[in-house]
Image (cartoon, helix red, strand yellow):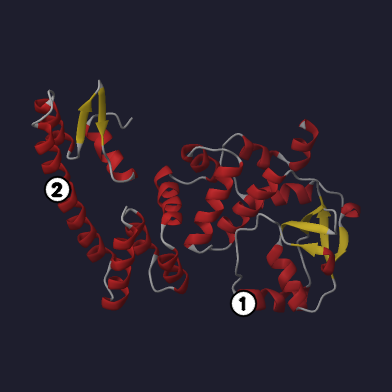
Amino acid sequence: MENKRRALGRGLEELFNNEPINISQVEEEIINNTPKEHITMLNLDELRSNPYQPRKNFDEESLNELASSIKEHGVFQPIIAKKSIKGYEIVAGERRVKASKLAGLKEIPAIIKDFTDEEMMEIALLENLQRENLSALEEAEAYNSLKTKLNLTQEELAAKVGKSRSHITNMLGLLSLPNEIKDEVVKGELSMGHARVLSKLEDKNQAISLADKVINENLSVRRLEELTNSKEEFHRKKEITHSKNKAKDNEYSYLESDLCEKLGTKVKIKNNKLEISFTNANDLTRILEVMHLDK
């Protein structure tokens, strides 16, 4: 295993130590450490996409521009590939492969390396995040795949990809959106800002209704936030009132009532247990801040 790490270069090893890296540095180090005689020409028909490739669609205009450049100057930088049961899997350089096909090439220079599934996933994610803008949903799905496959916490994932924890939380929250809203995001009818606000709503039907309202009335993100905040505040006050009324029949009623007021949410004390309700991750963070437990 140690030999494999050295072969991959310091850049990727840093990634395994939860330090964000630049994927270009990883590729550059692999290429610089590979003798020219070990760079081989692969038939384009033998190449298959990285199974962990998060990008579902590639920008046609960008590909055509790259194809024109390749047609005139050739492929300057070899791709990195892994030998598979049938042919080869692309580890890094899928855009170069697609553009080469558009340029009419039959072969492409490549460096063959042995990668684990985890390494292939990380490289595919980082290459797309750092070189091409993924759609919001593609980025969210890529993060979730990496988090699940490597069994990472959100904090560990944030450190691994060099993003803030809040960014990771917001992106993963998009995956909870109803498919109807996801479709509108993909079509560009809803912005990333709209999607983030809607992802925080627990009531999916309410989220869909508000999404329709945004599209039909061309509402700004700020206006959507105002609408959701007013609805959340209404439901919160309703929960507090309900909790206060129920507390009257409880021997700890005075404590429940006091905690309801201080925490701004439903609180229940029963059978030597304290239950504090929250609507979503943001509401939980707010409650922890009030309790000074957000460290």
Q: Which mark is residue 269?
A: none
- Residue furthest to the front: 249
Would you say 215 lies left or right of 62 here? left
Would you say 117 lies left or right of 147 here? right
Q: Amino acid at mark 1?
A: Glu
Q: Which mark is residue 238?
A: 2
Q: Which mark is nearer the camera, 1 or 2? A: 2
- Identify the mark nearer the N-term, 1 or 2: 1
Q: Residue at x 13, y 27 (%)?
A: 250
The part of the image, by quadrant, that contains residue 94 is bottom right
Q: Residue 220 location in percent, x, y?
A: 27, 69
Check disc 1 and report the residue beneath it: 60
Q: Residue 206 location in percent, x, y?
A: 29, 62
Q: Residue at x 60, y 40 (%)?
A: 150
Classify mark 2: residues with Cα within 10 Å, few (<14), some (14-19) or many (20+): some
Closest to the observer, 264 or 289? 264
Classify mark 1: residues with Cα within 10 Å, few (<14), some (14-19) or many (20+): few
Q: Quadrant of the N terminus?
A: top right
